[in-house]
C-alpha cells in the first residue's frame, strides 16, 4: 500500500473523525474546537491552509479536504506508512518515532480523553484506520528514508490531547 491509497485513507480517517460528514462547521462535542469532516484543530487551520495553497478564510468542505489531503500526503512522505500517518494525525507527528520503537508503551495503549469524553488509544485509533482501509500498513522505503524535521507539538493535527509524559 503506497501513496496511491490516499483516498482510501481519507475515507477511513474521515469516517472515524466525523462519520464522513459534509458539514464544514461540525464541531467536536468535547470542546476541543476541532471542526469539519477531518476535525482539524483551529490552531492548525491557518498555517496548514497556507501550506496547501488554500484561502484560510474559506473553510468549505472542499478546502478542508484539500488541506487534509495535503497534510496526509506530507505525513506519508515523511513516515512512509498509513498507520504512522494516523498516529501523526491523531497524536502529532512528534509521536511517530516512539510509536515505531515501542507501540506497546502506555502512551499509545491507554485510552485518551478530552473534556471528560473518552477517545480510543493512539494504537487503537491507528489500527482502526488501517483496518478500515482494508489492510496492513508496512513502511514504504521510498518515503521512509527522507523524513523532514519533526514539527513542534503546537502544530498537532488532532483533537486528542497527548499525555504530558508522552
Image (spheres, grey):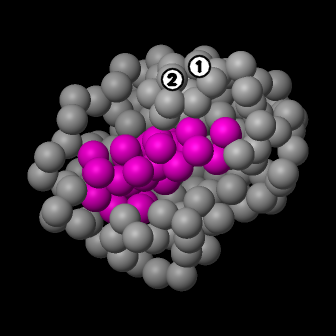
Residue 76 lies in the magenta-colored region: yes
Judged from the image, the secondary structure of the residue bearing numbered disc 2 is: helix
Q: Residue at x 80, y 59 (%)?
A: 19
Q: Quadrant of the N terminus?
A: bottom left
Q: Relative to residue 121, is residue 143 drawn left or right?
A: left
Which quadrant of the figure has residue 80? bottom left
The span picked out in magenta is 63-91
Q: Which residue is mark 2?
A: 50
Task: State whether residue 137 appears in this view.
Answer: no
Extreme residue toward the left, this view: 145
Judged from the image, the secondary structure of the residue bearing numbered disc 1 is: helix
Callouts 1 and 2 close, C-beta under 8 Å: yes
Q: Which residue is mark 1?
A: 46
Can you give x and y, in whole percent of width and height, for residue 96 in the image? 34, 44
111 to 31, vertically: above or below: below
Q: Relative to residue 89, is residue 63 drawn left or right?
A: right
Residue 156 lies in the magenta-colored region: no
Q: Nearer the viewer, residue 78 or 103?
A: 78
Query: How many residues crowd mark 1 within 10 Å: few (<14), some (14–19), many (20+)?
Result: some
Amino acid at each position: 500500500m503506497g501513496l496511491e491509497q490516499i483516498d482510501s485513507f481519507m475515507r477511513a480517517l474521515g469516517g472515524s473523525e466525523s462519520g464522513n460528514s459534509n458539514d464544514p462547521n461540525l464541531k467536536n462535542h468535547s470542546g476541543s474546537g476541532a471542526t469539519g469532516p477531518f476535525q482539524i484543530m483551529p490552531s492548525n487551520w491557518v498555517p496548514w491552509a497556507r501550506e496547501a495553497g488554500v484561502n484560510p478564510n474559506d473553510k468549505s468542505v472542499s478546502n478542508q479536504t484539500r488541506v487534509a489531503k495535503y497534510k496526509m500526503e506530507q505525513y506519508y512522505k515523511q513516515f512512509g506508512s498509513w498507520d504512522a500517518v494516523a498516529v501523526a494525525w491523531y497524536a502529532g507527528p512528534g509521536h511517530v518515532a516512539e510509536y515505531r520503537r515501542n507501540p506497546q508503551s502506555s502512551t499509545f495503549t491507554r485510552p485518551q480523553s478530552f473534556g471528560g469524553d473518552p477517545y480510543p488509544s493512539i494504537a487503537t485509533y491507528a489500527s482502526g484506520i488501517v483496518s478500515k482501509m482494508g489492510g496492513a500498513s508496512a513502511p514504504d522505503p521510498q518515503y521512509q528514508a527522507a523524513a523532514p524535521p519533526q514539527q513542534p507539538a503546537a502544530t498537532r493535527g488532532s483533537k486528542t490531547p497527548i499525555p504530558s509524559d508522552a
